[in-house]
Image (tube, helix red, strand yellow):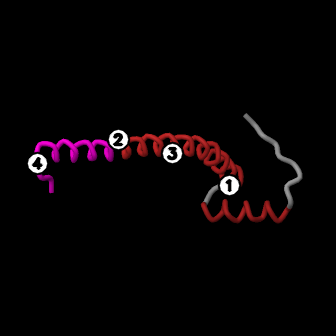
Amino acid sequence: MNVLIRNIPEDQLLRIDYKAKKKGVSREEYLRQLIQDKAEEDELKIEETYHKEVLDRLIDTLIENNRLMDLIATRFGIEID
């Protein structure tokens, strides 16, 4: 699919060209990579949020399990280091 973007200020194009040259790619390839990175960034944020929520629930569960194990150990006179 082709995309045409008009009226980009010259100073911005010069910066884009400089960054593309620094990476050793064409302006077109540089912009393609930039668009792809941005598109994937949103997906990664969603995944990161999901994994953080799962990790938080896991930590809460481990804390509760430790509390219950301490309670059981106390009732049975077992010392836990």
- Please state the extent of the stretch shown in magenta in the rendering: 62-81
The residue to which callout 3 is attached is 48
Mark 1, Cα crowd under 10 Å, few <14 / some 14-19 / many 20+, is: some
Up-down: is 23 above or below 51? below
* Label 1 to label 3: alpha-carbon separation: 32 Å
Indicate which disc, 4 or 1, sits on the residue closer to the N terminus.
Answer: 1
* Label 2 to label 1: alpha-carbon separation: 51 Å
Indicate which disc, 2 or 1, sits on the residue closer to the N terminus.
Answer: 1
Mark 4, Cα crowd under 10 Å, few <14 / some 14-19 / many 20+, is: few
Residue type at tag 4:
Ile
Residue type at tag 1:
Ser
* Label 4 to label 3: alpha-carbon separation: 40 Å
Q: Main secondary structure of the magenta part?
A: helix
Residue type at tag 3:
Glu
Residue type at tag 2:
Thr
- The quadrant of the image that shows the N terminus is top right
Residue at image location 63% in from the left, 56% down from the top? 25
Q: Is residue 27 left or right of residue 22?
A: right
Q: Are marks 2 and 1 in contact (CB under 8 Å)?
A: no
Indicate which disc, 3 or 2, sits on the residue closer to the N terminus.
Answer: 3
